[in-house]
Amino acid sequence: MDLAKEFERVSKKQKTSFSVTSDQIDKLIEELRNTQRELSAGETSMDTGSEEWSQVHSSVPLTLSKLRKAFLESSIVNGITQEQKDLHSAISKFGKAIDKVMHTDLSKACRPHQFESQVLHEVIAEHLFRQGKFNLGKKFVEE
């Protein structure tokens, strides 16, 4: 499969996933705002000691349980989850397509190379001196 086509498919999926997820989140926000309005509608002009206030205050758990039930029963969470799974699947397929096209041959990156022992010993000694390990570096040079 051509990488450009695969990239276009992933890009298109990302755009649709974003729009669907945004719509779902907007619905969730609207549901939360409606509940907030419902809760605050009864509290605005009441005295905290009045009987009406205690009725409104006692209805808060009921209102919140309705919100929780509506949230769990709605397709908002399932829709967002499914969109994310689909997007992840498309990205994974794109990664596999890249792996098929890009062959990794490590033999080109790692060539066998013989170091001259004298040069290697000088580099080690210089490193020890730079690290402040003068006694160890001196002993290494002597040996």
Image (cartoon, grey):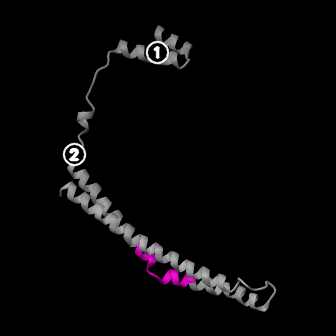
Say whether residue 65 is magenta.
Answer: no
- Corner quadrant of residue 103: top left
Res. 126 mark:
1
Q: Is residue 123 left or right of residue 95?
A: right
Percent of width and height locating residue 68: 56, 81
- Between the C-alphas of marks 1 and 2, the distance is 39 Å
Task: Name the outermost residue toward the right.
Answer: 49
**Number of residues whose C-alpha sits closer than 10 Å to that of mark 2, classed few (under 14), some (14–19) or many (20 or more):** few
Say whether residue 69 is magenta.
Answer: yes
- Corner quadrant of residue 133: top right
| Kind of residue indicated by mark 1 | Glu
**Number of residues whose C-alpha sits closer than 10 Å to that of mark 1, classed few (under 14), some (14–19) or many (20 or more):** some
Q: Which badge, 1 or 2, comes first in the chain's sequence?
A: 2
Percent of width and height locating residue 95: 29, 55
Percent of width and height locating residue 93: 28, 60
- Corner quadrant of residue 7: bottom left
Q: Residue at x 42, y 70 (%)?
A: 22
Q: Secondary structure at mark 1?
A: helix
Q: Residue at x 21, y 55 (%)?
A: 4
Q: Is 60 above or below relative to 143?
A: below
Q: Is 22 above or below relative to 70?
A: above
Of residues 49 and 113, the one nearer the viewer is 49
- Tell me whether circle 1 and circle 2 mark residues in contact (CB < 8 Å): no
**Magenta segment, which residues?**
67-80
Q: Is residue 143 left or right of residue 110?
A: right
The secondary structure that most of the magenta stretch takes on is: helix
Mark 2 sits on what residue?
Answer: 103
